[in-house]
Amino acid sequence: MPKAKETVLEIDLGALTHNFNYLKSKLKPTTKFLAVVKAFAYGSDSIEIAKHLEHLNVDYFAVAYTKEGVVLRDAGIKTPILVLHPQPVNFNTIIERCLEPSLYNAKVLNAFIKIAEEQSQANYPVHIKFNTGLNRLGFWENDVDYVVSKLKTTKSIKVKSIFSHLAASEDKDEIEFTNKQIEFFKLISKAFENHIGSKPWLHLCNTSGVLNYSEAHFDMVRCGIGLYGFGNSAKENENLFPVASLKSVISQIHKIEKGETVGYNRAYKAKGFEKTATIPIGHADGISRIYGNENGYVKINGCKAPIIGNVCMDMIMVNISDINCKEGDEVILFDAANKASDLAESANTISYEIITSISQRVKRSIIK
Ligand SMILES: *Cc1c(COP(=O)(O)O)cnc(C)c1O
């Protein structure tokens, strides 16, 4: 790999292939695979990731918002796309761009039926979301009769799947609760099937659900974080390869005396003669201020350099007093060896947050 000459997020499609195959190896051959590519494919590059997964014959995509699905359709993605969290204002666009809505309450169900009828749609594919304990989005179990009665009034839509979402699939202390969610989901889908007389697909598991609850894969699973290289334990992380590496470069080195300060608000004070490096990446690039004041660190020539003082909008300063390095040297924020999950931990957050925070200002570089 050539050394970074500026701030860059490298996206390793080989790692993506590996993770996809690893997760698929946990499924029955007939279980379908939905790849979650919301939030720029977890902060990477949704178009490149979706194209690659389409090439690997993924069955489905999901995005959070309609706009994200439109971007994929504009890029020529043909695979079905589930929109997990649409609003009625998006429903014309959803139909126009062949996206498939999650319908999660009476208001959106009725709004979608109305628009599908206005557009003379027949059997337009929709997905009904049920709440089984996350208490975030979804119909409640006692809404089954209502949903079914609405569906019987129209030929404009057809339920392609029924789904729910686990609240704590990664947490071994919550096995009992998760098992209850699974049982609840079975009861709801059974009631639904009995009333409607057809068998929509069922899906419940996210990445941790796939890894921890093999009995609950149903007809399809929805994987996000695992595709990007993070599991739910250190052990699982060994089987997955991080897709994104965030790299930068040393712009300038300063030598400062004891008592001199670094950065805004003079937040760091040198304890003796020290060396600092200035790196062109800041909170506008996704390195939150939480990483400042020696919570977070970067790696330079294999050594840990703590981030000192406050994170600026476009820069961080790091302590390189004990590191042999020069201006122009490569800086690693995270990569396959220095995991984003470890850096995230230094700021009491999780891999999901740090990788999805890398802003669109950072150049993406695709490694085939
Ligand atoms: C984001 C999301 C997923 C993916 O979860 P991971 O833990 O990243 O695998 C699956 N289902 C729903 C409803 C989601 O919102």
Image (tube, helix red, strand yellow):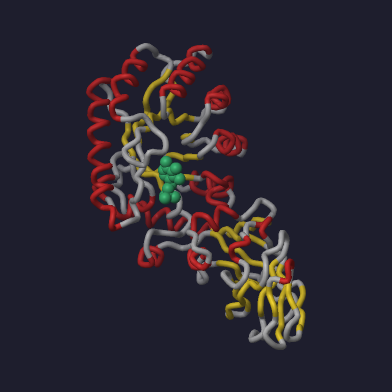
Residue 291 is left or right of residue 181, and the answer is right
In the figure, is residue 177 to the left or right of 344?
A: left
The spot of residue 356 in percent (x, y) is: 55, 53
Q: Which sits in the foreground, 229 or 263?
A: 263
How many labels, in total?
Answer: 0
At horizontal 26% and vertical 31% (from top left) the residue drawn is 188
* Residue located 55% across and 36% down the image: 69
Residue at image x 38%, y 22%?
Answer: 158
Q: In which quarter of the image is the N terminus?
A: bottom right
Locate residue 203, reporting x and y percent: 33, 39
Depth check, front residue: 172 or 1: 172
Residue 196 position, x and y percent, is 28, 20
Residue visible at 27% across and 37% down in the picture: 185
Specify the quadrant of the image occupied by residue 5: bottom right
Name the one closer to the observer, 6 or 263.
Answer: 263
Above or below residue 174? Residue 343 is below
